[in-house]
Image: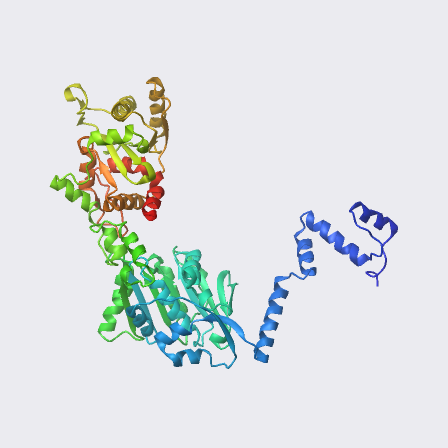
Amino acid sequence: MILDLDITDQQKDQLKKLGIDGSGWTYADLVNISAIQAAVNGSVSAMQYCRNTAGYSPELQLREAQFEFEKERKTGQGTEVEDISAIVTDIWGYDAWMRMLNDGIPVLLTKEMDYKFLEKHKEYIRKCQDNMYNILEGAVRSGKTVDNILAFAKELCSTEDKFHLATGSTMANAKLNIGVANGYGLENIFRGQCRWGSYKDNDALIIRGPYTNFEERVVVFAGSESSVSYKKIRGNSYGMWIATEINLHHDNSIKEAFNRTAAAKKRKFFWDLNPCHPKDPIYEDYIDNYREKDDRGILKGGYNYAKFTIFDNASISKERLEEIVSQYDESSIWYIRDILGERSIAEGLIYGSIATHIAAHDGEFHIEKKEAQKLISSGGVVGINVGVDFGGNGSGHAFVATAATKGYDKLLLLRTERYSEGQIDPYSPGHRRLSDIDPEILSQLFIRFLKKIISDYGYVTKVYADSAEQVLIRGFKTQLSENGLGQIKVVNALKSKITNRIFATTSLTAQGRFLYVGEDCHSFEDAVSMAVWNPKNLELERLDDGTSDIDTLDAFEYSFERDINKFIKKQAGR
């Protein structure tokens, strides 16, 4: 009754100040105005009141949607879902498709996912139906994850277990690679039958529709990279478990996931991974261990394993495949792993191709100094950068100058120098020995290097120096000013991931887009000829124990690492 009373004249006057005609308004209207004012002033509860009163409550909308869904089901109206009939029939047969629709409710198949599988992929997916352990290993872009997603989704349609697990190194990785998967994820397969929600602080895909006979299935997504990630899934019970990049999962998470599926009515595992070190624990403790037990007939549940190369992915066009392969040096570990999908020991020469040509003295990657000078003087490069790596504790100081041609078509290495204590300075009068390289001597060597580049090629655009030695960098800046070179800026090197820098070099080498002035780059030749992978590390790591010249390689990479993406874009544009 109070809410229906007319407001007072004084209250109407207040409304007029807000530009509102209060004629005929009641206290109920005034309450709403007050709530809006409170919401504008930052009251969260007032915001929620306004939202709910206006009919935008998420909970209410969900209830309304569920009500409409149930009403359509009871009246026999069609439900719009993803049409996966073609691929289901192709892999498992027509009867399997009919069993997925045995609820008798008419559906509208309005879209069809464009699956392209070679027969070896189809055979692996079929075998998933009869095996507990399903493991796919192989090259990048070989279609591993999509295979497992489809096999996992098919099992979701018939399993009696309500809760299931999907993991990646992080939750975001799991959602991206399993939930989305470039349009082939679970959310696409169950389009019209699923929604994203949460379960015990984990994101979850909640599925309920014709494909699951209107039984609810909850796929919980979790990350598994750290030693404490397992706590996010502890206490839950799951039926099946799908994992992407299983080799990046922490062992605690793997063991916990196995424990959480112990009571499942249909216990199945779907793993994928890119090849890694042959002695990685994921092989010795799990994958190869299960294979051996299966061969001996003592592994219960069945073992389904397959390995694919990038050439086994039918969804990649011939042109794109050639483009991807062209980035790799066929003699490099990257090609063996990423293209052929083979497990490889991270040891041996890193730059195998260029080291072979250096040993052969065939000048394969050489550019004549006069040719480089002509190219630069005619404006054929975008700039000349110098990379600097500071030594210490047995390592040396290195200076390297590079230039990128216009359009980032090629990378030119112009000059390299490396100095360490006790070394003979070949460019000094009498070839004196550097008994002690203090900051002053180092600055002198630096200025001499820059002047040589300017003398040979006309200018230096920028210097990228190791950021770990700010005192030495300030000394360089002082020397530049004192020598009339103050226009040359010295900035911190980006120091991006070393393996990315290595990949950029081997990729440019494989494409014939890297050249160097042989007569001025002897320290570089020595460095790439001796650089090897660390055999004691399971992860890819450049060996840095003093047996090879890592300093020159670091300085070389500092000089162009900020342009790596531009070089890659140029390659992709080809």
Q: Is residue 180 above or below residue 518?
A: below
Residue at image point 60% right, 69% down: 65
Residue at image point 33% right, 27% down: 472
Residue 305 as seen in the image, left or right of residue 530: right
User: Viewer-proximal residue, 343 or 340?
Assistant: 340
User: Viewer-proximal residue, 422 or 111?
Assistant: 111
Q: How many numbered callouts?
A: 0
Q: Position of residue 131 (x, y in %)?
A: 32, 74
Report the colour scheme.
rainbow
Q: Residue furthest right?
A: 9
Q: Is residue 214 visible?
A: no
Q: Is residue 166 visible?
A: yes
Q: Residue furthest left?
A: 360
Task: Examine the image and state in which quarter residue 221 appears.
Answer: bottom left
Q: Residue furthest front?
A: 378
Q: Is residue 20 above or below residue 455?
A: below
